[in-house]
Amino acid sequence: MSMAEYKGKVKHIQDTPFGYTLSVIGGKWKMVIIYLLAENETVRFNELKRQIGTITYKTLSSQLKELEADGMVKRKEYPQIPPKVEYSLTEKAETLLPVLEELCEWGVANQKN
């Protein structure tokens, strides 16, 4: 169903496919995390933190847990000392990558120099 087909049929945006999508990728950091995982395939927590820069450890941890709960991120923990944890995208998240590419192309076309 398109957005127009939902008009007047639902009370809340979160009840629509658009609302679901926003709940999964919305917020300040989730699309950034997905983008970095797409670019690097598998990334350790501290490397993600370094690449993002301004995100706190607590926020990054929370966002990764939410993405994992939504089936977007895989977390692989290695039983070693010191602990090693790697994050990568799931197949579900990879289906979102063409949409993110389109958003990037829109940014290229519309960003003022």
Image (spheres, grey):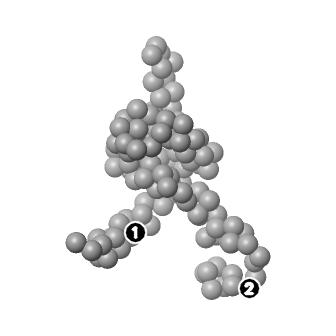
Residue 35, image x, y percentages:
40, 53
Say what amino acid the circle numbered 1 marks: Leu
Residue 61 visible in rendering: no
User: SS for tag 1?
Assistant: helix
The alpha-carbon separation of the residues under discs 1 and 2 comes to 27 Å
Horizontal side of 102 relative to 63 (left or right) equals left
Name the residue located 59 percent from the left edge and 64 percent from the top edge: 21
Say what amino acid the circle numbered 2 marks: Gly
Residue 98, image x, y percentages:
41, 65
Name the residue located 35 percent from the left edge and 66 percent from the top edge: 104
Q: Which residue is mark 1?
A: 103
Q: Which residue is mark 2?
A: 8
Name of the residue lying farthest toward the left = 113
Residue 107 visible in rendering: yes
Residue 22, image x, y percentages:
58, 63
In this view of the protein, which residue sits in the foreground, 52 or 74?
52
For residue 82, above or below residue 87: above
